[in-house]
Amino acid sequence: MAIIEFPKDIRWGAATAAYQIEGAATKDGRGLSIWDTFSKTPGKVLNGDNGDIACDSYHRYEEDIELMKELGIDIYRFSVSWPRIFPTGTGEVNQSGLQYYHDFVDALLANGIEPMCTLYHWDLPQALQDKGGWENRETVDAFAEYSDLMFKEFDGKIKKWITINEPWCVSFLSNFIGIHAPGYQNLQLATTISHHLLLAHGKAVTKFRESGLTGEIGYAPNLEWNEPYSNKQEDIDACNRGMGWFIEWFFDPVFKGSYPQFMLDWFEKKGVTLSIQDGDMAFIHQPIDFVGINYYTGSVVRYKENHELFDNEKVDIGYEKTDFDWNIYPEGFYKALSKLKDQYGQIPIYITENGACYNDGVENGRVKDQRRIDYLKQHLTSLSRAIDSGVNIKGYLTWSLLDNFEWAEGYDKRFGIIHVDFNTLERTKKDSYYWYKQTIKNGWFDM
Ligand SMILES: CO[C@H](O)c1c[n+]2c([nH]1)[C@H](O)[C@@H](O)[C@H](O)[C@H]2CO
């Protein structure tokens, strides 16, 4: 067997998000989010599930932190529910909401766990959506106001900030493909929103820099790896368009100061234009301290004339799949990270999400999720290879600490290393929890 070893200073963590774990949807002054609305719209979420209770982490976070401490992680990525802070998105601050996050962050720090805070993980205040949501540039300013308040309120406690989680999901998955809130299917709308999200990121970075506060700030784009089906130019081009939607479209503006021309040309062919105002790109193109990368899967892609948005299609060449039917493609993890290094340089990278959906249940008090252990081994092996090749990896945070509300799939899809019984809310450490705990302790594992 091969020993896969990691640098002694790598950070080991786990990740969650507010709407997926907190519950307490109407508790202590929290306002409604678009996911409260969407999940209660018939047909939008499997089994009609919603986040009213979720893992009830709002009330059970001390238990969760005990589990984190036993696990041995030293960093924990969570998100703040914007409508818990500003119930209507702007204006009056909900002090009970702030107090909840102070109590939570203080408990993390008291247990030697560094908080990594995502300011936006998809739960836009409904009141802002009612005024146009991310299509309205006023939402960009509201996000900057909310971010500024959080930076100042948690100065000295939170030193790693993530502005936007997965702008591709917030824009295209939610407003073009339409399976996430608010559920529109309009390419122009989605493309406009993608620009406003990057602008919101940039304005929040500006607020952080102007505040002079200590800490680091970044964003967390998601990426998939696409491999061309053949070395025919039409397949290579089709593959690059697909990946350009995840990588160049959301990385070039931040790291190069402009949108990728090949993608702009393609969108123009589809009748889509971007209205960029003077100064927008200067906000977006500000230096950041790290980038959070969310990686789960990859696909083989080939050209298919007039098919979907990019004249391409995924080809199933027999990859093993998770219980979410996603390809298991660890090679793509290494290739994607290598591409980022080659195209954007040595920006520090935290893997802010990587994990798999396996729905193994509790049998005699145990959850035998060997398939998740295998997935983690394969992807951490790729990560180790990327580190050895010079990619500037600072940490790895698995998705997710807990089984939780998996958006349009509700509670049907389980990503946690800890099982949650959504009837009793009982937590059960899975075999993968124990494997990850040993790997963190050792700093290596036996492949
Ligand atoms: C398509 O994969 C995306 O990168 C992605 C996967 N995931 C995500 N983004 C989100 O950030 C999480 O909230 C999801 O729970 C998690 C699992 O679905």
Image (cartoon, grey):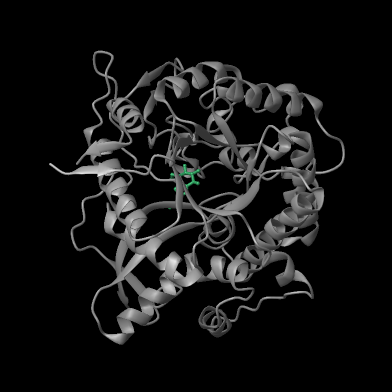
Identified at 43% across, 75% down, the residue is 241
Instruction: Locate the C terminus and report the quarter of the image it occupies.
Output: top left
Relative placement, left or right, of 299 versus 157 is left
What is the residue that sits farthest to the front in this orientation?
A: 8
Nearer-the-camera pick, 353 or 52? 353
Instruction: Work out whether residue 26 can be spotted.
Output: no
Q: How many dots with numbers?
A: 0
Instruction: Locate the N terminus and report the quarter of the image it occupies.
Output: top left
Q: Position of residue 136 (x, y in %)?
A: 76, 60
Relative placement, left or right, of 136 versus 304 is right
Q: Quadrant of residue 93?
A: top right
153 above or below 274?
A: above
206 above or below 430?
A: below
Identified at 75% across, 58% down, the residue is 203
Q: Position of residue 118 (x, y in %)?
A: 61, 43
Q: Position of residue 101 (x, y in %)?
A: 68, 28
Nearer-the-camera pick, 34 or 427? 427
Identified at 29% across, 20% down, the residue is 362
What is the residue that sits farthest to the right in this orientation?
A: 91
What is the residue that sits farthest to the left in this orientation?
A: 1
Q: Quadrant of residue 2?
A: top left
Nearer-the-camera pick, 413 or 150? 150
Q: Position of residue 229 (x, y in %)?
A: 25, 74
Instruction: Work out whether residue 287 can be spotted.
Output: yes
Nearer-the-camera pick, 163 or 128? 163
